[in-house]
Image (cartoon, rainbow, N blue to C red):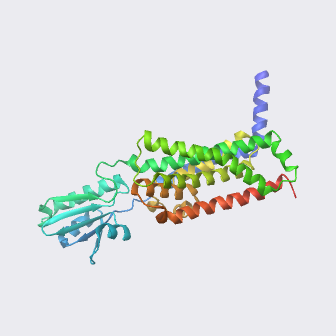
Amino acid sequence: MRITALVKRIVLQLVRDKRTLALLFVAPLLILTLMYFLFTSNEVPSVLGVKNVSDELVAQLEKVGIDVVSIKVKGDIETVIIEDELDGYLLFDAGKVTLTLENTDPSRSKMLLAKIQQAMGSSSSEMAKTGMDTSYIYGSDDTTFFDVLSPILVGFFVFFFVFLISGIGLLRERMTGTLERLLSTPIKRWEIVLGYLIGYGLFAIIQTIIVVVYAVNVLDMILVGSIWHVLVVNGLIALVALSLGILLSSFAASEFQMIQFIPLVIVPQVFFTGIIPIAGMPEILQGLSKVMPISYGANALKSIMYKGTGLSEILSDLLILLGFAIVFIVLNILALKKHRKE
């Protein structure tokens, strides 16, 4: 009887909590649908630039699934690869064969190298009988997938924990009545938002510094660029996570409901960090990636830590992150209206 009463109370509580019911039944379907489309995406064929390569070998390369682009103009090989968005450049010059791989995705580079070797093994051209020198623009033949993944992880964990702590922190302010008492004073809404941003932001900056320094100096994660640039990007990621966490906490009535935002807001962002090649996704998902703040942060961190680029080369990513933060801050100020009307 007592168990029946307990079960009845729990069922009634859940039935009355429409948001929890929706998340309980709908969120898994959304995530599963997203994963289905992501992991059944078409593989994007490798694009190889070639110069002075025989037509017979080009045919063999295309036969193994490589998109071959004939390079006509002279120029620096690295520049050609980056500007033409090639995965590699195969050159036959002065009796020597050289292959330069872009290598932002080591597994993709290894697959391309294997296909080229397979094509050359099937070719009867003079070039195919010559030894091939291989070089890399980024990393080396020892580069692993984790070397590329580590910058993404640094940005993601900063984003996740700042989002969680700031959201739950402000929620406690509301649940304890602190926010309502604050709103009963003449203080402006934008002053409240700014105060929370600075207050939680100080700890977010400290957390960011600890994560970055630990990842680079203790875990020896790859860092080709400047650590100061990494801190700038992570600072922006933390600002976006902070403003987003505070914003979503306005729509949660309990810590349990705040946690429920994780599968809807955080988990989908993981898929758009670059772990799965965005170019191979359906067009609708490629469009969705443009509204995922962490995708810009991950791209900026990967450029600095793995490629060694400077801030000027990732300026667009930084401006978009700043734009996300400004939009969330404005929405935060507007969201406080439901707690106090001026």
**263 and 158: which one is in front?**
158
Question: How many numbered marks appear?
Answer: 0
Image position, residue 189 (x, y; %): 80, 56
* Residue 116 visible to the viewer: yes
Q: Residue at x 60, y 51 (%)?
A: 238
**50 and 119: which one is in front?**
50
Image quarter where the C terminus lies is bottom right
Q: Residue 44 sits in which quadrant?
A: bottom left
Q: Residue at x 65, y 50 (%)?
A: 242
Image position, residue 46 (x, y; %): 33, 62
Tell me: 231 left or right of 101.
right
Tell me: 124 left or right of 245.
left
Image position, residue 56 (x, y; %): 18, 70
Q: Residue 79 sits in which quadrant?
A: bottom left
**289 and 231: which one is in front?**
231
Q: Residue at x 53, y 42 (%)?
A: 210
Image quarter where the N terminus lies is top right
In the rendered image, the vertical position of residue 161 relative to residue 302, given as above or below? above
* Residue 85 visible to the viewer: no
Image position, residue 92 (x, y; %): 18, 68
Q: Residue 164 sits in which quadrant?
A: top right
Tell me: 176 left or right of 224.
right
- Furthest residue in direction bottom, as rendered: 73
**140 and 38: which one is in front?**
140
